[in-house]
Image (cartoon, helix red, strand yellow):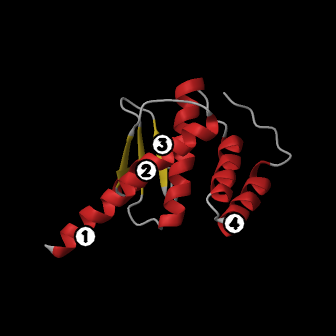
Amino acid sequence: MKKFYFLITSSFALFISADTVLVEAKNMLDLDAKPIEVIYDNDLVTSVCPKGSVGCFINDKKASIYIRDDISKDHHNVVLFGMYSDYLQFSNNGLIDPSLTCDLKVNYLSENRKSHLANLYRGYCDKTFKGKVIVLK
């Protein structure tokens, strides 16, 4: 019974954090959209998200974000921020700019004093998107 109580408490803390992360994404993008459900489930992530990912934003009948339930707290927040950024872009423009999302994650980490992670993400963004033309469909 104690383990079950701990899991509820732990998940509740993540959902409170999710609300805060959504507000930060809305503010950084200056976009608005209704809140969507965030589902923490390793099996669902494996079945609905791209192979090897820790989560994804899916816009089907009901838009949802799926995240592995064993993701570290630091990575949880930036991954969730990125998915909310994708959701906000898609809800407002019908498109997702992965380069913008990447840069926003670096800014989010920098603003939250996670400079080591910000540098890692900046390196990834530069390697993946710098000097490349991105065609949005």
Residue 60: image location, x then y, percent:
41, 32
Question: In which quadrant of the rendered image does the C terminus lie?
Answer: top right
Compute the Cα span from label 3 to label 2.
14 Å
Q: Is residue 53 visible?
A: no
Q: Disc 4 marks which amino acid?
A: Ser
Reading the image, the residue beneath label 2 is: 18
Q: Is residue 137 above or below residue 78?
A: above
Compute the Cα span from label 1 to label 2.
18 Å
Compute the Cα span from label 1 to label 3.
27 Å
Q: Disc 1 marks which amino acid?
A: Phe
Q: Is residue 55 above or below residue 63?
A: below
The mark that comes first in sequence, 3 or 4, is 3
Q: Nearer the viewer, residue 114 or 68?
A: 114
* Element marked by disc 2: helix
Residue 24: image location, x then y, percent:
55, 45
Q: Nearer the viewer, residue 28 or 57?
A: 28
The mark that comes first in sequence, 4 or 1, is 1
Reading the image, the residue beneath label 3 is: 57
Number of labelled discs? 4
Image depth: mark 1 or mark 3 in front: 1
* Element marked by disc 3: strand
Compute the Cα span from label 4 to label 1.
31 Å
Reading the image, the residue beneath label 1 is: 6
The mark that comes first in sequence, 3 or 2, is 2
Q: Disc 3 marks which amino acid?
A: Phe
The mark that comes first in sequence, 1 or 3, is 1
Which residue is located at x 76 percent, y 61 percent?
123
The mark that comes first in sequence, 1 or 2, is 1
